[in-house]
Image: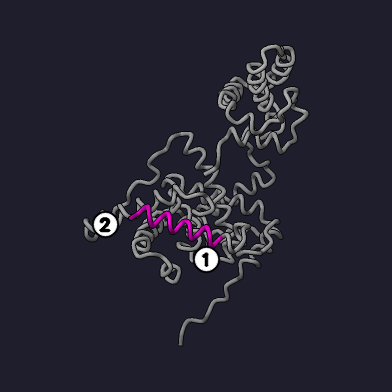
Amino acid sequence: MDRMNEELPRGLRVALDALEARAAKRAAAVDPERVAARVLERLRRGGAEAPRQVWWARPAALRIAAAVVLLVAAGVVVSRAPSRAPGAVRLEVSISAMDSLSSGQLEAVLQAATEVRAVADSVLPTSSAASLDDLSEQQLETLLASLNGAEG
Amino acid sequence: MGTPAVAVVPDGDLIARYLAGDELAAAELVRRHATALARFIAAHGAPDDELEDLTQEAFFKAFRALASFRGGASFRTWLLAIGGNVLKDRRRRWRRTQVVELTPEIRDPSGDPGAQAEAGWTAERLEEGIGKLARLQREVFLMRAQQGLEYAEIASGLGISEGAARVHYHHAVKRLKAWIA
């Protein structure tokens, strides 16, 4: 670390030394033996355990969430072209999509949907007749990533 | 006459032994790298009460993915990169729960209180600045400046080019220098 430190401006080097001293002190409270025991226990118990996925990353939930997004986008289209009345389509999608959501999931999806207007135009196909089948898995991911915000 | 040198089993051999079913080899890998990983995580601003859990989580994920470890980077660098991913997920949760104070100040009862306060402030200020960096800048900076890794090693561990690693480091240093000025 000393050699690397020589590359740093003095003020930053001093700050890094202070941070490192503090990190080392805090890391000393981590017991490697305890960590090893717990890791091994978890590996024995759940070595084949499926990786935990947030609910919206599951393919079914992804499509459901995207359905809600499309509903909102459809609202945008309707507001721009009042002569079109896609209400029937919206009803069909909403019934089939919402059945499998818990109330908590539904609430989260709807909350996310309220934020979608700003990004929908840039992500969704421009056709007003767009449906879920028009979106690739990647587009669905992009759509939800847009909702989820940029990662810091 | 000195103490006879004890042959250190390379990480690669321990990995092969673990993959063949030897749990003791995994425990040895944890013993060998847990402190460095915990320091890396601590410098990212992880709260004290989550430090061991994050360390454990990174090892767990690493062992589960060990079959895919190709050895382009060292096991430690690969582990640090996994630690960075674990932190990324956890940061989302911190943001959702609006955790503001990530680390309480640790004071050493010995020594000059004034100097300690100054060092504590400086460390906190840098930690805050590190937390504001983009993820790759943050990881490259800590891998280089804290862990002392070479650019080629960092690049291999993070799956980026060596040039990109240099650029991220340069930007991180520039931003942090301005932050703590």
Q: Which residue is mark 1?
A: B149
Q: How far across and down, in percent of the image, does residue B158 sit?
A: 60, 57
Relative to A4, is B114 on the left or the right? Answer: left
Q: How far across and down, in percent of the image, does residue B60 sit?
A: 60, 50
Magenta residues, dominant SS class: helix
Q: How far across and down, in percent of the image, does residue A83 sit?
A: 70, 11
Q: Residue at x 48, y 57 (%)?
A: B171
**Are there few (<14), some (14-19), or many (20+) residues within 10 Å of tag 1?**
some
Q: How far across and down, in percent of the image, does residue B65 sit?
A: 66, 52
The vertical placement of B63 against A146, above or below, is below
The vertical placement of A148 against B88, above or below, is above
Relative to A142, is A150 on the left or the right? Answer: left
Numbered disc 1: what chain?
B
Specify the quadrant of the image occupied by residue B22.
bottom right
Q: Residue at x 51, y 55 (%)?
A: B139
Residue at the bottom extreme? B1
Numbered disc 2: what chain?
B
The kind of secondary structure element at disc 2 is helix
The kind of secondary structure element at disc 1 is loop
Q: Nearer the viewer, mark 2 or mark 1?
A: 1
**Any mark on residue B100, and which?**
none
Q: Which residue is mark 2?
A: B116
